[in-house]
Amino acid sequence: MLRHLRALFIPIVMSSLLPGCSSLMNSATTRMADNLSSAILNQNDPETVRAGAPAYLLLIDSLIAEAPDEPANLATGAKLYSAYASTFVSDPPRARRLARKGFEYAKRALCLQQATLCHAYTQSFADFEPLLKQTTTDDVPLLYVFASAWASWLQVNKSDWGAIADLPKVTAILQRIVSLDETYEHGGAHLYLGVFASLRPPSLGGQPEQARRHFERAIALSHGQNLMAKVLYARYYARLLYRRKLHDRLLHEVLAADPHVPGLTLLNTLAQQQARVLLDSANDYF
């Protein structure tokens, strides 16, 4: 069920590297982290990011070691490790190690800022859901970091049925984010939910029309500037229902767009790469 999730983490976790995630650090560190995050997001050469990101991971580790109870540092570490593991690492054991570190950082941040959920997320869904409903708009950034890191960890552990059993909790967190602030991270929670709803065909419990609504809402919330939203729409919804015309239209729109958008350039460059691959394989698929 989770075998298709790898492409999902590129748009969502990468976009969460936006400046501001380190607002509680000292001013000099904040400027450095913000500037480096901006440089990553505005880079139009993914290979440069692939080669350079490990140095930033070590930098974040050092910041966390210096201030282990600083939620902002932990959140930044969770985002970076999850993004790198899901987007750029092809070796499964290494991806699992890096994703686990990202998830551990996310759990520590959650426990520092939301002690109730810290104890509840390992409990049954029936116990977890009522506590989740007590969260507020102020909790959205933390919930998004935690859900993203958890989903990344689930993806690299897709052969572990015990891990997959936690997917409803991740989905519930994302649904809560949508109910509190659907605009957060260009509607990233909608993208997750769109993919989750289209992992299976309708005959096996999939919900493609629900997925369509999530994808279209994400596109609207980003004003069409997040090109990966259209790629995911084509990959998961259009291919699931064999809607070739929609599939090709979305991907041609991606290729025709200017990828250079502040904060989205790396993401859009990756989207255009994936759009070409999907179009090249379309005749074999449909």
Image: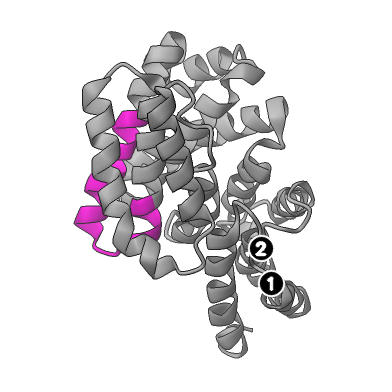
Label 1 Cα crowd, 10 Å radius (few <14 / some 14-19 / many 20+): many
Examine the residues drawn in magenta and state their main secondary structure: helix
Which residue does the image show at 44% across and 42% down from the upper left? 151
Q: CA distance from mark 1 to mark 2?
A: 6 Å
Residue 2: x %, y % from top left: 44, 54
Residue 26: x %, y % from top left: 40, 22
Residue position for label 1:
254
Element class at badge 2: helix
Label 2 Cα crowd, 10 Å radius (few <14 / some 14-19 / many 20+): many
* Mark 1–mark 2 CB contact (< 8 Å): yes
Give the residue furthest to the front. 28
Q: Is residue 109 above or below residue 224?
A: above
Q: Is residue 90 left or right of residue 35?
A: left
Task: Locate residue 76: give its quadrant.
Answer: top left
Q: Is residue 276 above or below residue 139?
A: below
Disc number for residue 227: 2
Highlighted range, magenta? 84-106
Q: Is residue 23 magenta?
A: no
Q: In terms of depth relative to the viewer, which is nearer, 191 or 48? A: 48
Disc number for residue 151: none
- Residue type (three-letter) at the residue carrying disc 2: Leu
Residue 46: x %, y % from top left: 43, 67
Q: Mark 1 or mark 2: name the one nearer the start of the chain.
A: 2
